[in-house]
Image: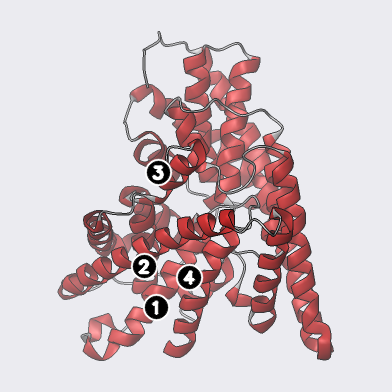
């Protein structure tokens, strides 16, 4: 970021107040999503009880929800998708902070899209809303252009922290992924904004980890080579996932005979059909991740089915052009992948490797690292979301191997670099 400005203490007060707003908006967003998912779950239960053609209910509701969310996103520029790539573009001065109208578009469109069962994450809209609130706070208090950009970036981290109840993850995300620099002033602003944001959001959400994992002993040191190989395989899987996300967006761009809203409705209908078959095949994946991390492991064939379907349906949902992020479905896919690898490799593992949960937890962080190329963020987020501090060494191992493998495969850049270049027309 060019230039340097004299430190202005007032900017920390602005960050604190803006952080409170991010916490209230992000906390409300999560609360609304929980209610929407509960309502959709009641619809699925009702359709199952009614039988007959009632399976068309979730198909129609998801199709309608995707179409409405897409229509909202098309009315407000850059409301579609994650928004993290836009935050990175603003930091690089390739774009300017967006107008405040983006916040209600992301909020309402995100609740409709995610509440309808699309395989999207809450973190993208929350990060984008946090960034816009930070920039608007800077503008309203007549901060310099550089301070506005700093507030935009630091409050994006607060948005991520609220999405996953992961305050340290929000700080690391700003430094490792968004800016790729470690500057004291940026870190301090992010700390202040994140602390107030998470504190305010806890008034609505509480402070428990998203996926509390039962206490477990650290895996045997003899399993580290297994985790190393597991991480390398996850790196290859992550490259494939990144390519599919970008490829699905490019394919939809070339389907010009069908308008964007109609295309979103078709994608929603496909996802709705999956949900009618099995509710765990759709949605952001929190319910599926919670079951796996709680030790409720399906048989290998079911895990393989979840992996294949969600691997394809996640990028398809993102291509619908509605507000929604990539993180949460990616974490769920990583948990499924880890549980599947454990089930397949179990006959070859020593007794210490009999537990599947460590593989599910490390799979989350490893796949995130391979797709985003931010291994420290992946580790910190996973530890904060699960409370699994005993898995630090396996997490370091798998994330190292996954990131290195993805980098060595070369032809596919980190996902948000690809999306940013696509957004700015540089690719």
Identify the residue at image location x=38%, y=80%: 340
The disc placed on residue 417 is 3
Please identify, in this view, whether the residue under mark 4 or under mark 1 is nearer the observer: 4
Instruction: Identify the mark nearer the N-term, 1 or 2.
Output: 1
Regarding mark 2 in the picture, which secondary structure is present there?
helix
**Vertical comparison of 220 with 420: above or below:** below
Instruction: Identify the mark nearer the N-term, 2 or 4.
Output: 4
Task: Judge the density around disc 2: few (<14), some (14-19), many (≥20) Cα neighbours within 10 Å.
Answer: many
Q: How far apart are the alpha carbons under marks 1 and 2?
A: 8 Å
Residue 384, percent from left and from top: 43, 54
**Vertical comparison of 186 with 406: above or below:** above
Q: How far apart are the alpha carbons under marks 4 and 3?
A: 20 Å
Regarding mark 1 in the picture, which secondary structure is present there?
helix
Give the labeled residue for mark 4.
311
Task: Judge the density around disc 3: few (<14), some (14-19), many (≥20) Cα neighbours within 10 Å.
Answer: some
Give the labeled residue for mark 1.
339
Please tell me which residue lies in front, 381 or 208: 381
The disc placed on residue 39 is none
Res 206 seen here: yes
Give the labeled residue for mark 2.
363
Please identify, in this view, whether the residue under mark 2 or under mark 3 is nearer the observer: 3
Please identify, in this view, whether the residue under mark 2 or under mark 4 is nearer the observer: 4
């Amino acid at each position: 970021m060019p230039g340097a400005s004299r430190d202005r203490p007032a900017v920390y007060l602005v960050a604190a107040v803006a952080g409170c707003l991010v916490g209230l908006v992000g906390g409300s967003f999560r609360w609304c999503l929980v209610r929407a998912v509960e309502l959709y779950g009641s619809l699925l239960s009702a359709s199952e009880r009614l039988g007959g053609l009632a399976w068309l209910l979730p198909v129609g509701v998801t199709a309608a929800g995707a179409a409405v969310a897409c229509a909202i996103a098309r009315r407000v520029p850059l409301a579609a998708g994650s928004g993290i790539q836009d935050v990175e573009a603003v930091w690089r001065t390739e774009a300017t902070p967006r107008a405040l109208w983006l916040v209600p578009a992301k909020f309402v469109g995100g609740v409709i899209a995610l509440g309808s069962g699309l395989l999207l994450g809450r973190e993208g809209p929350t990060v984008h809303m946090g960034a816009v609130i930070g920039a608007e706070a800077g503008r309203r208090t007549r901060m310099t252009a550089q301070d506005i950009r700093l507030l935009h970036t630091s409050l994006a981290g607060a948005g991520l922290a609220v999405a996953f109840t992961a305050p340290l993850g929000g700080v690391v995300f700003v430094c490792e992924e968004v800016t790729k620099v470690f500057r004291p002033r940026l870190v301090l602003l992010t700390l202040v904004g994140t602390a107030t944001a998470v504190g305010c959001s806890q008034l609505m959400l509480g402070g428990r980890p998203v996926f509390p994992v039962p206490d477990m002993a650290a895996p045997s040191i003899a399993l580290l080579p297994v985790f190393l190989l597991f991480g390398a395989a996850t790196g290859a899987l992550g490259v494939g996932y990144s390519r599919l996300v970008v490829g699905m967006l490019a394919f939809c761009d070339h389907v010009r005979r069908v308008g964007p809203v109609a295309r979103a409705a078709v994608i929603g209908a496909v996802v709705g059909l999956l949900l009618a078959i099995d509710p765990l095949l759709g949605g952001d994946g929190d319910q599926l991740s919670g079951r796996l991390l709680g030790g409720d492991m399906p048989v290998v064939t079911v895990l393989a089915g979840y992996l294949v379907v969600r691997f394809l349906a996640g990028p398809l949902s993102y291509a619908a052009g509605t507000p929604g992020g990539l993180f949460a479905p990616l974490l769920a896919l990583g948990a499924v992948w880890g549980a599947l690898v454990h089930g397949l490799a179990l006959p070859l593992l020593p007794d210490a490797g009999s537990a599947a949960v460590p593989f599910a937890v490390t799979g989350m962080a490893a796949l995130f690292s391979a797709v985003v190329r931010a291994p420290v963020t992946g580790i910190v987020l996973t530890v904060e979301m699960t409370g699994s501090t005993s898995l630090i060494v396996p997490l370091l191992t798998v994330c190292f191997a996954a990131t290195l493998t993805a980098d060595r495969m070369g032809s596919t850049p980190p996902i948000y670099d690809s999306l940013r270049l696509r957004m700015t027309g540089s690719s």
